[in-house]
Amino acid sequence: MEGIDAMNYKAPTPIQQEVIPEILQGSDLIACAQTGTGKTAAFLLPMLHKIITRPVGDHIKGLIIVPTRELAIQISQQLEGFSYFSNVSSLAVFGGGDGATYSNEKRAMSQGVDIVVCTPGRMISHLNMGYVKMDKLQFLVLDEADRMLDMGFFDDIMKIISYIPNKRQSLLFSATMPPKIRDMARKILQKPKEINIAAATPPEKIRQEAYVVYETQKVPLVRELVHKDKDLKTIVIFCDTKSMVKQLSRDLKKTIRLVEEIHSDLEQAEREAVMNRFKSRQTRVLVATDIISRGIDVEDIDLVINFNVPQDAEDYVHRIGRTARAQADGKACTLIGEKEQRRFAAIERFLGREVEKVTLPEKLGKGPEYQPEKQPPFRGHKPHHNQKFNQKRQQGRGQRPAGKGQRSSNKPVS
């Protein structure tokens, strides 16, 4: 309770209210909840409670498997905060470190650290050496399970599970629940309770806007969005590729202070340093790939800008979900290029509503890359607001989606 108080937790979130009692009762669990809902504390707190109240020997008692080192670090930091006033020990295990880091991980797992937070590849390299004490493991947690499957970690996860006892409590958390997640759950969980907090849609508190632009207008528009509101203290700009991140970061640094970039080409220590500066508001604008779109907890992000329209609707939800976390408000802007309109229309169909299209600022033409062209029209299709109608239309006998050579029945938006 001292740890919870020190972490400034006052009241449980909906997922914590649903999940914590089930875990305390010992049930296996499959929970669907998007990031920013408090799911990390939902599994850490009951796990810590059980370990504190039933201490049994020097061995690994809890294993939390996550897709990325950034998420491993974040969960480990929360775990340290909650357990600060207890005797529970924890360890983050992930790739990218030096030989000394590997030796420290080996020593801790050989001696029997209480809880390990790990990425799959690094954990397997330790398990292959034979010194990891996993024979009395009590708790297995798979966090961001859908992301791990997307990254191709299924075989690694199953290999890790082959090292742990069959008699254990297993918890699976995922933002989405596609069939492949349910298939994995059947292999890993025993008669699980299922909790579905909310569909993976953006929080209502996020004010969503979009600009329909030519590619040459994107960089000047980003400059304008960053410059015009000085009250925006933290801004994340998502790009599709590392090369785009690097180029946009260079472009913005010409006229904007406190800009940094983060992507997988940076060494782990550099990425941690960048995130720490952003969290402490030494950096105002962070240009990033989707490396930080899921599971990274940075409070009070004021604005998320999608420099490119995300590849699919779930990526869009995760990107803009970086803002309006907990009880805060937030804003998300998406720049829709000429070749990205169809993709954004698909996102609107997923959301079940049209995102407001905003008129470009008049003074946009001052940027050096700008070409004096008018704002292009948006030629996506309006999503039908009646979801039942959409479902019936899709299930209609003999019908198929409009493709090449076909016209959709929806009229284009001017």
Image (cartoon, rainbow, N blue to C red):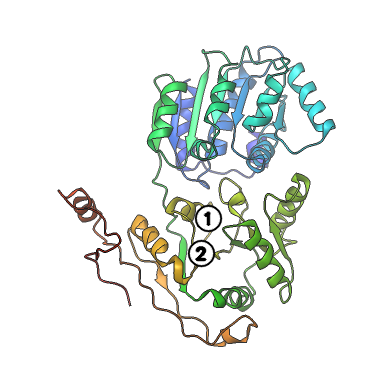
Relative depth, front residue between 268 and 258:
268
Depicted 299 relative to depicted 259: above or below: above
90 to the left or right of 42: right
Identify whether 90 is placed above or below 283. above
Point 70% across, 57% down: residue: 278
Q: Nearer the viewer, residue 319 or 169?
A: 319
Q: Which structural element holds mark 2?
A: strand
Work out which residue is located at the far right of the displayed protein and give it.
100
Q: Is residue 229 left or right of residue 271?
A: left
Amino acid marked by disc 1: Arg
Q: Which quarter of the picture shows residue 91?
A: top right
State the CA–CA distance, disc 2 to disc 1. 9 Å
- How many numbered marks, from 0 up? 2
User: Which residue is outermost to the front?
Assistant: 405
Q: Which element carries disc 1, helix, strand or loop?
A: helix
Instruction: Residue 319: give its label.
Output: 1
Q: Residue 21, image x and y in percent?
A: 46, 28
* Residue 84, placed above or below residue 347: above
Residue behind mark 2? 332
Whole-percent x, y for residue 29 in the image: 45, 27
x, y percent for residue 302: 58, 63
